[in-house]
Image (cartoon, rainbow, N blue to C red):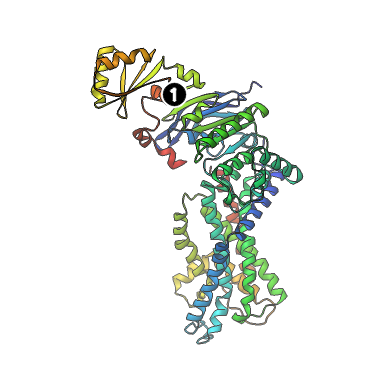
Amino acid sequence: MNTPAVELDSLNHRYGDRLALNDVSLTVRPGCIFALLGPNGGGKTTLFKILATLMTPTSGSARIDGADVVSQQRAVRERIGVVFQKPSLDVYLTVAENMRHQGNFYGQSGEKLRLRSGELLERFGVADRANDRVKALSGGLQRRVELAKSLLHRPRVLILDEPSTGLDPGARVGLTDYLVELRDKDGVTSLLTTHLMDEADRCDVVGVIDQGRLVAQGSPAELKAMIGGDVITIHAADPDSLAKRTSQRFGTQADVMDGVVRIERPKGHEFVPDLIEAFPGEIESVTVGKPTLEDVFQHVTGHRLWDENSSASNGGGKKHG
Amino acid sequence: MADSTPSGGMLWLPTASLWRREVVSFLRQRSRVVGALGTPVVFWVLIGSGLGRSFRMPDGSGGGVESHYLEYAYPGTLALIVLFTAIFAMISIIEDRKVGFMQAVIASPASRLAIVLGKVLGSTTLAVGQSLLFLVLAPIAGVHLTVASVLALTCVLVLVSLGLSGLGFLVAWPMESTQGFHAIMNLALMPMWLLSGAFFPASGASRWLAVIMAVNPLTYGVTALRHALYLGSNQPVQAAASPWVAILVTIVFTAATIGFSVFAVVRNR
């Protein structure tokens, strides 16, 4: 019970000169849905591969449910269910055939496997498609089969790499709902990588990873509380000048990101009238909002999640992914 | 915990599973069936018919008679069917590993030996199946098959297929892209076939070519096929080596490619 589901200790990984993971330490408690949020190339996929025993870290250790990913590979493989970003189904085989193969790889066979497979397909609402070739299924249904397949051997920990790739927002919500159900009914821990704020928002704990470093972690609410108050965004004709003068006049930090002025401030609604009066005619629009995980990401990293420069300067993860 | 020792359930069950998948997926893709069997047959017919009249065996026989070359090239065409099947199977490894089915196999506790065996046995089954279909055309080549020669051919085909599939696996496993594999195929695998005595005998070739042919392991595979084809007949066999040498070399080659493949899978993460 007290064994952490996932435990990383000073994990480092290098591709040549590039440090893809930089001293990452992390504990995920059992029965938790943990989202690793970060840009492409930030180190998420590298971490996923290490946890899924597909790659050996340069240094440091990673344990899953107490088993070390390097020295106890076999034990780790038996404990984890892996959902890949890219499809891992054979499209020429039927759903049931794919399930049967998967079971075989985990030493399951016969009637027991058939029943377990049927039960999972039922649970994920794809039982009626069991005898269809995977090719004939929509992307959303294929994802559900991927998830069902990864659960055949009753893993304690699910590791999912960008599980909602290619899914529409509705299907994304559905996916997280399944993870919640697995957590509540079976006590399955999930660790997923994502670059989607809405997905991370629905998880229990979010770890923000950027340029190989774990820069923040906590529940979505805790992370948002790091930003004392509201986030005010201003569209203006000359954002740079406006940001500068706002800082001077009100003594508050105002940054420009992607041509938009951004201010973090408690009681934002009281600040807006002052702002508009101070710069008449210059402001095109103002929005005041509670902080989102996007704001948290900007707060802790100083750049946007989708910032082109940041993903280009450390974009090697994609090549290796 | 002995992580590397495969327990029974984690070896044979995944092996059988991968084998079945290989065969079923193949049969469901018509283009692959046509490609693997059709290409060598077209090669054989076109080259055999085109080259047949000008081809002369080093002993002076065969010149001007088309069917002699068709007969000469027949065992080599069997080897080509096997080679093409192995190549097709191995291209799928490269594709499957980054995006696809193999990802899940690698992340599973299945024995690493099962990954190699399942793939290699699957490819071997397909290759031998197609080669046996090709035997239907033996009378066109003027080859008289007997029960003994068909049985011997089957055994040798299994052996050669295991070896070439193992070689394909070994080459394909570390590859990042199928483009790289195509380069290897054109620069190494096809010349390996051309210089195996499948196409022309070493005795008529220049000295340096003859040396390459003598060290080419596939030469012995094709030689073994040639001996098997004429088993029980008193026809003289145009062969580069004695049957037992040919079989021994092929066994060693097969064991080596499969052994190194397993090593590559265990090591390469």
Coordinates of residue B146 in the picture (x, y in percent): 70, 77
Q: Residue at x 52, y 28 (%)?
A: A35
Callout 1 secondary element = loop
- Using the rendered view, name the quadrant where residue A283 is placed: top left
Chain of the residue on which disc 1 is drawn: A
Q: Would residue B195 appear left or right of B157 to someone viewing this image?
A: left
Q: Amino acid type of disc 1?
A: Thr
**Residue B122, placed above or below residue A316:** below
Q: Badge 1 is on which residue?
A: A292
Q: Residue at x 48, y 80 (%)?
A: B50
Given the current orientation, which residue lies at the most extreme bottom position?
B64
- Residue A253 in the image: x percent, y percent? 31, 17
Counting from the top left corner in percent of width and height, residue A237 is at: 25, 27
As displayed, is residue B157 above or below residue A197?
A: below
User: Toward the viewer: B151 or A305?
Assistant: A305
Residue at left offset 51%, top offset 36%: A162
A78 relative to B103, above or below:
above
Can residue A101 be seen at all in this image of the molecule? no
Residue at 56%, 78% in the rendered image = B72
In this rendering, position of residue A101 left or right of residue A306: right
Q: Does residue B85 appear to the left or right of A109 in the view shown?
A: left
Q: Is residue A142 visible?
A: yes
